Amino acid sequence: MMQEMQVARRLRFRNKIALAPMVRVGTLPMRLLALDYGADIVYCEELIDIKMVQCRRVENELLRTVDFVAPDERVMFRTCRREQDSVVFQMGTADPERALAVARLVENDVAAIDVNMGCPKEYSTKVIPSRHQGQPTQPILSALVKGVSKPVTCKIRILPSMEETVQLAKRIEKTGVAAIGVHGRTKEERPQHPVHCDVIKAVVEAVSIPVLANGGSLDLVKSHSDIESFRSATGTSSVMLARAAMWNPSIFRPQGMLSLEQVMDAYIRHAVRYENHASNTKYCLCQMLRERMESPLGKLLHAAQTNAEICEAFGLGDFYRDTQEWLKVQQETLHANAGSPRSLDQPTLDGDVVTMPVKFIRREYPPQITPKMCLLEWSRREKLEQPSYETCQRPLDRAFQSTVTVAGKKYRSSMWWKSKKYAEQSAAIVCLRTLGLPEGRSGEEGVQIVGKRKREERLDDRAEGDGKIAEGRRDLSSAAHRKRRMSENGDSTAVYRAVTEQTAQ
């Protein structure tokens, strides 16, 4: 029965209207707004596999979302139950193994997985060098189709000739993907160039899987009624909208578009409710205002730096304060219902290793002081063996994780790091926090560690003492040498006197 329900809920790509993937635009507030207005499918912004594979999945009880959080605590991808059957997770990838790891990380929280082969942005093509070539991407798509339970799709741009584009689409179809999104421009062409509807149509005729037409926002799609015209011109059953939806997401409304003021008001409410980052909220609103950025409202938006200031600019100050109060009450309720909820920083056991999701932030510590130094000093005072660190590197993203052994017990951070040194410092923090010891943060009480200058003075004193001992050994050696020479000459009295005087000195 469960399998039948999953099949019934499986996302289909025929006769759909979709919010296309757009960097910095396809975040949760915009996706929810598009669904509110009538979109069938919503794509998230492209997320690079190297960043996503480092994330951990966190159920955010306060916001009622699922967050995928990077080691630096940034939320790379946030989703919620409202869009679970409609959201397509788009990734940028050039590695089948890494792509599969990311897909398996998110597959239970999304409706489908998409591989981006069509982004013309310089940063994206540098990260994903296999784009626009087709053949290197086939193993990635095949691995995803075989390795995850959700539908797999990909999005391409057309190649220089129609024949090349059709051949690419056929190769992609053989991998078993559920659909192909086709942007009707080459990677060199920009929005001011006309979209090649004839090439998209040729792809539709060459493959049996659904094709989603993309690229008609400037010339062909300016209102909801134009969507059907674009669908007819390309021969596709489905259409995905990017810029037209970015400028006014109510283009998905069959009843007609709403005023920009109404749309921005609704967008801000989603952004505040789901604690969207202020810079992202501001960016999306700027895309909606466009030529009106020089208006009084545009200038207020330009000056705003926080979600609170954005709300004040749009007359939503009371809404912002009410929402923050509501969130505060919800947070208190969660704590009360949990009794004594376990903090995320409480240690847990992973086999025989004590773990915590902690990180080392260098700016929080004074110069020359680190958690490793604090742990080493404590071990010396307790007459324990010096802490030993064992560090491994993850092949997928070449990130490091370190385990420190102290007094026969092992400790490590559950996070992975680009730096081996930071991985070791994080492991030291876990050990110190578990033992209830100070870790050396600026202003922290109880830190008993010798500063660098005192340590150097202590080393200098030790070196001076070692020098005197060495000098004494050299003098004794010289005296013994004279003794042997005198003995050879038979003057035992002189030998005795010489050795006694040298030793006394």
Image (spheres, grey):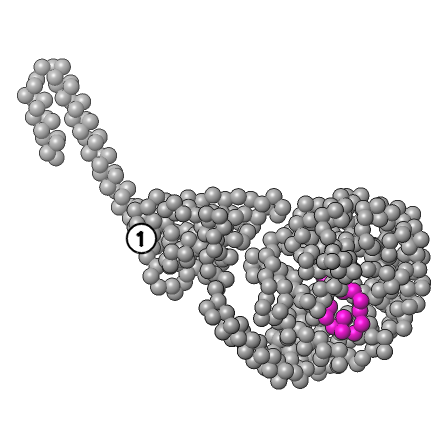
Query: How many numbered markers are drawn?
Result: 1
Q: Quadrant of residue 187?
A: bottom right
From what the image shows, is residue 371 above or below residue 472? below
| Any part of residue 123 in sight | no
Query: Residue at point 15% right, 18% down?
Result: 485
Query: Residue at point 66% right, 69% down?
Result: 280
> What is the three-letter code of the residue carrying label 1?
Lys
Quarter of the figure with the N terminus: bottom right
Q: Is residue 487 left or right of residue 398?
A: left
Q: Callout 1: few (<14), some (14-19), or many (20+) C-alpha neighbours within 10 Å?
A: few
Query: Residue 355, how many percent across, how many down?
Result: 48, 53
Residue 40 belongs to the span the image colors magenta: yes
Quarter of the figure with the C terminus: top left
Query: Residue 119, how many percent across, how many down?
Result: 77, 56
Q: Nearer the viewer, residue 95 or 449?
A: 95
From what the image shows, is residue 318 above or below residue 219? below
Query: Residue 248, how many percent across, how many down?
Result: 79, 74
Q: Is residue 128 left or right of residue 336?
A: right
Query: Residue at point 72% right, 70% down?
Result: 32
Residue to which mark 1 is pinned: 454
Query: Residue at point 42% right, 53% down?
Result: 431
What segment is highlighted magenta in the picture?
Answer: 30-45
Q: Is residue 233 left or right of residue 105?
A: right
Q: Nearer the viewer, residue 440 or 363?
A: 440
Residue 366 belongs to the span the image colors magenta: no
Q: Residue furthest front?
A: 1
| Any part of residue 330 in sight | yes
